[in-house]
Image (spheres, coloured by chain):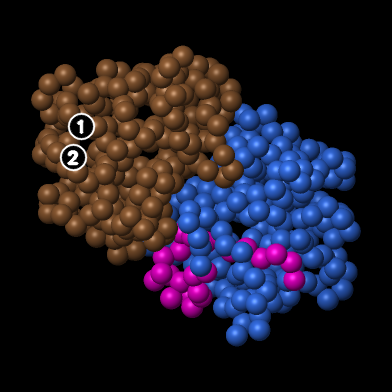
Chain colours: A blue, B brown
Amino acid sequence: MAIKTLGAKAAAALDQELMSTGAFSIDQLMELAGLAVSQAVYRVQPLEKGPRILVACGPGNNGGDGLVAARHLFYYGYRPTIFYPKRSKNELYQRLAKQLEDLDVPFADDFPTAMKSTDHIVDAIFGFSFSGEVREPFPDVIKSLQETKIPVTSVDAPSSWDIENGPPKTGLGSSFMPTALVSLTAPKPLVNHFTGRHFVGGRFVSPSIAKKYNFDVPPYQGIDQIVEIGPSEQKL
Amino acid sequence: MAIKTLGAKAAAALDQELMSTGAFSIDQLMELAGLAVSQAVYRVQPLEKGPRILVACGPGNNGGDGLVAARHLFYYGYRPTIFYPKRSKNELYQRLAKQLEDLDVPFADDFPTAMKSTDHIVDAIFGFSFSGEVREPFPDVIKSLQETKIPVTSVDAPSSWDIENGPPKTGLGSSFMPTALVSLTAPKPLVNHFTGRHFVGGRFVSPSIAKKYNFDVPPYQGIDQIVEIGPSEQKL
């Protein structure tokens, strides 16, 4: 039995529902999403494997999740560096960036240089609203991500992948397979093409929302905001 | 060496600083505070000791922290019930209450009746901004809390206690000693009168803020949002 997934349109509708009738603010949801990402990184990249985390942030919500995750990682004892070349004028993202600046977390200007001194990379470039072409300056970043041997954790989607169909057939991103993926809220159809470690972080979705959008709430344990979904559960 | 504490005025100034130059939103801070409380309850009242948690919420921020904690406790597998007799018109608290209603978490009208079927109580009535008299309808609630044998976890302050001087010398609250206390951001001076299990939840305070307000960041472990401060660290 294949895992139940949430298509791009359904994911957008669910987000909209959480923030309207669900009464969540985007601050709240982004805090919980970023917290989930930080907990997955803590599993994939235990501190003793190296504390330097390069967080590549895109211009939208996926980048915001990355900024929140970086802050939590700082508190866990990691040394995050942020690559955030397309800073949004959105007030929330500006505040999230300020919170990192107040922790003296460095912002890198050049991705290849920053990659030379990191132990792990978080890909928070594009999320479930991505479609079409990878815009500048991100093609070179995606190229680096697909070529590097440094482990990569992607947030919600491996950046450049199509949300429904997975990796591009040819060209940029076609051979990008991150070490780990954190599906936020619920897995998207692209997970059927993903062969790395797969986590779900959506412990803020009510049973009624999960039922309405027809996905299963995975077996979160204890106080964890994430759960690792094994290959056996992912596909049969 | 006594633990370094944060007086009521300093705590208010710190909160204000986090939300102005610190660029945090109250949604974000309340989510993190409530999450910390939920993690402390998870330690004090493991699920196997009984999953029913009665959360008594006051009209202000302390009550908001309680509402957030109740939501996280629901996701951990507890069965929270909310007592929230003075509902605020504040939009944030209304949203936090709606999030619980969407989980079918019950709201109780009568505190003594609700106490008859609970395993643990969270006291989220008054926080660091409390001073003076306990207003209606809370005197009866405080009386119940100080008489009950059901374990109680207080949020930031045992309700009715003076933030600087601890329990009232006589009358209401003078013999109230909760099982556990979660100091949010940093311990307040009242902790010098507290003899139960003491947790600190403030893993969102930057090193520079801690330095400026002259308190120590306790040794949080792993991904925990709380740390238990043993009596030996509390007083010598």
Q: Quadrant of the C terminus of chain A?
A: bottom right
Tell me whether circle 1 and circle 2 mark residues in contact (CB < 8 Å). Answer: yes
Task: Point out the stretch of residues depicted in magenta.
Answer: A195-218
Q: Position of residue B176 (x, y in %)?
A: 20, 32
Chain to which the residue tagged by mark 2 belongs: B
- Residue B166 among those drawn in magenta: no
Label 2 element class: helix
Q: Position of residue A222 (x, y in %)?
A: 48, 56
How many numbered markers are drawn?
2
Chain to which the residue tagged by mark 1 belongs: B
Task: Report the residue marked by disc 2.
Answer: B145
Residue B176, labelled with which disc?
A: 1
Vertical relation: B76 (above or below) B145: below
Residue at left 53%, top 17%?
Answer: B212
Residue A189 shows in the view: no
Front residue of A230 and B235: B235
Q: Is residue B231 left or right of residue B98?
A: right
Q: Residues within 10 Å of mark 2 (few under 14, many from 20)?
A: many
Amino acid marked by disc 2: Leu
Amino acid marked by disc 1: Phe
